[in-house]
Amino acid sequence: MLPTWHLPRTDLSVSALCYGAMGHGTLEGDRADRLFAQYREAGGNFFDTAHCYCFWIANGLGESERVLGAAIRRHGCRDQVVIASKGGHPGAGEHYPKPDRYLSAETVAADLDDSLSRLRLDVIDLYYLHRDDPRLPAGEIIEMLNAEVRRGRIRFLGASNWTAARIAEANAYAAAHGLRGFAASQPQWSLAQRNAGGDPTMRAMTPDDFQWHAETGLPVIPYTPTAGGYFAGRDVASFDNPVSQARRERAVALAADLGCTPTKLALAWLLHQPFLTIPIIGTTNPAHLADALGAAAVVLAAEQVKWLTEGMMWC
């Protein structure tokens, strides 16, 4: 069974692995419900979705939240699960039009209206801003989010794809004004090193971010923690480079010694960081989900964690 941890700066108790429902809006029949049940039976209680999921498929906008909300109602488990969603995403073409000021109070409030309606919830436990907007002062953003906390529509705050420096600025403002600050960060992070390029608004963990999290203890809830199947041998161009190749080779070797899969080992590596790290697993394959759920049982020595990232100065 998955262990459960207290999420600092909140009253939330969350399982060691979060289940990302991004792909659930694309599933037919009762497949999403079976995956929901599989995760819950393993002790999972922490789900992640977003306002913009799944705008990239025909008539898909909002389906991830709708499917997740329906599963919660069918299982009658609202008081047993922690629901995270995200709003404040920039525009993404005709299928996800947004104003230039995508973190305005009006836009975020409208996103939240939609998410609560789709999920059929009164409140979202952990609400992330999906992106930052550096044009806005961090304090203005914190004031806007705390207004929603006072309205009772969100409980705790998260930042997705924000730099540690901006989170620190926001949390310093919150502390100085007696307001709620960010309780978690959601960057891309895995044992593989992501290549440069792609969406410039998406942020991967950096050495400076890592050091800040190690110093402050702010939890990290990373997305794409298995690098899209890279450790299972998939050809994932956005992660394939000499550094990632070397780490995958070491992961394969150590996994063989420990009697687990390289993917399970890559997730375990994240679970052994010096601050609370809760990877978001997003697979829609039951066998892959079963494999990932076993990562919490893999015990690594400090020397093994270091060896997996040998040559990486900040770890």
Image (cartoon, rainbow, N blue to C red):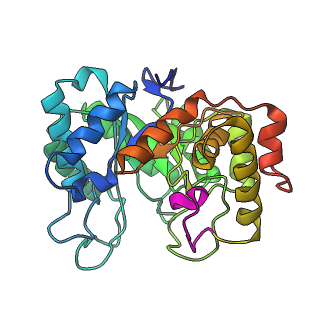
Q: Is residue 66 magenta?
A: no
Q: Is residue 230 magenta?
A: yes
Q: Which residues are magenta?
A: 228-239
In percent of width and height, residue 16 lies at 51, 30
In percent of width and height, residue 163 lies at 60, 55
User: Is residue 233 at least partly visible in the picture?
Assistant: yes
Name the one closer to the observer, 134 or 11: 11
Name the one closer to the observer, 98 or 40: 40
Residue 106 lies, with reference to residue 302, above or below; the image says below
Instruction: Give the residue at x 47% y 63%.
Output: 133
Name the one closer to the observer, 254 or 6: 254
In percent of width and height, residue 288 lies at 44, 47
Tell me if 229 is positioned left or right of 257 in this view.
left
Name the one closer to the observer, 236 or 55: 236
Instruction: Give the residue at x 31% y 27%.
Output: 81
Tell me if 89 is positioned left or right of 209 in this view.
left
In percent of width and height, residue 275 lies at 66, 33
Instruction: Give the residue at x 51% y 26%.
Output: 7
Figure disc tally: 0
Q: In the figure, residue 248 lies in which quadrant?
A: bottom right
Instruction: Give the residue at x 46% y 27%.
Output: 15
Tell me if 258 is positioned left or right of 83 in this view.
right
User: Is residue 273 at least partly visible in the picture?
Assistant: no
